[in-house]
């Protein structure tokens, strides 16, 4: 009978070989993951609960927060589990599901970021047309708000695209596996963790909504 074999699992690249560094990476990943969950969760809650934020710009932010949570939850929990349990294995089905969901979510996020870039272009370069193209209520979100997030928005898009291109277009023999890990970390983990800071700390209306939400939560506990 002919020999046959099937692949049942893959081995992921490890961030470290020593147990101490593995636990350090687990703690680092856990902190980043919790920060991403907290930041994006607060944006989701604030936009959903405050009717004043039910405008196109905040609709984009709500969907971006959802996609960020999906992207970072697709890859980071498995990396944390491997670091904690000192293993590199991932099942064939788990790897296929991870690749599918990550490609789908990152593609959707790129599309949303492109739409948000166009929204900021209209608000900055064609403010008189912004009301007719996006809606009269959005024409009120002004140039100042668009300018305040334009450069950070471009920085995140550039970081994500450049690192992803380096990861998948570079010659595989010219770079170490550690370099591959760092690049993949930059485009899959950093943007979901820092996006809440970019789109909330520079937005006064969103900060006011968050403070209002905190005040309501404190009143409920008293």
Image: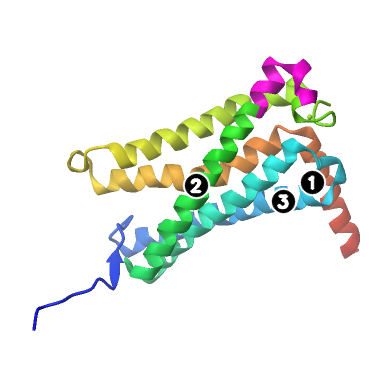
Nearer to us of marks 1 and 3 is: 3
N-term mark: 1 or 3 = 3
Q: Could you tell me which residue is drawn at 75 percent across and 30 percent down? A: 134
Mark linked to residue 106: 2
Frontmost of labels 3 and 2 is 2
Quadrant for the C terminus in the image: bottom right
129 inside magenta stretch: yes
Instruction: Find the distance from the CA under tag 1 to the CA under tag 3.
Output: 10 Å
What kind of element bears circle 1?
helix
Marked residue nearer the N-terminal end (3 or 2): 3
134 relative to 155 in the view: left or right: right
Nearer the observer, 121 or 201 = 121
What kind of secondary structure does the magenta stretch mostly adopt?
A: helix
Q: What's the mark number on residue 107?
A: none
Q: Name the residue under label 3.
A: 44
**Along the line of sight, the residue nearer the viewer: 182 or 154:** 154
Q: What stretch is highlighted in magenta?
A: 119-132
Left or right of residue 156, residue 203 in this image:
right
Q: In this view, does 83 lie above or below 198?
A: below
**Image quarter of residue 84:** bottom left
């Amino acid at each position: 009978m002919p020999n046959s074999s099937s692949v049942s699992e893959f081995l992921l690249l490890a961030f470290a070989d020593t147990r101490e560094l593995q636990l350090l990476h687990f703690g680092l990943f856990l902190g980043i993951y919790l920060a991403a969950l907290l930041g994006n969760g607060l944006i989701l809650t604030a936009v959903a609960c405050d009717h004043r934020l039910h405008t196109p710009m905040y609709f984009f932010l709500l969907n971006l927060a959802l996609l960020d949570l999906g992207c970072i939850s697709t890859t980071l929990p498995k990396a944390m589990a491997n670091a904690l349990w000192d293993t590199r294995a991932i099942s064939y089905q788990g790897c296929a599901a991870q690749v599918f969901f990550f490609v789908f979510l990152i593609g959707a996020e790129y599309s949303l970021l492109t739409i948000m870039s166009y929204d900021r272009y209209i608000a900055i370069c064609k403010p008189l047309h912004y009301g007719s193209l996006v809606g009269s209520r959005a024409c009120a979100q002004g140039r100042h708000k668009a300018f305040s997030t334009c450069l950070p928005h471009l920085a995140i898009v550039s970081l994500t695209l450049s690192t992803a291109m380096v990861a998948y277009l570079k010659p595989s023999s010219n770079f170490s596996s550690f370099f591959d890990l760092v690049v993949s970390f930059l485009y899959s983990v950093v943007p979901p963790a820092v996006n809440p800071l970019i789109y909330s700390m520079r937005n006064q209306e969103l900060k006011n909504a968050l403070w209002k939400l905190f005040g309501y939560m404190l009143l409920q506990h008293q």
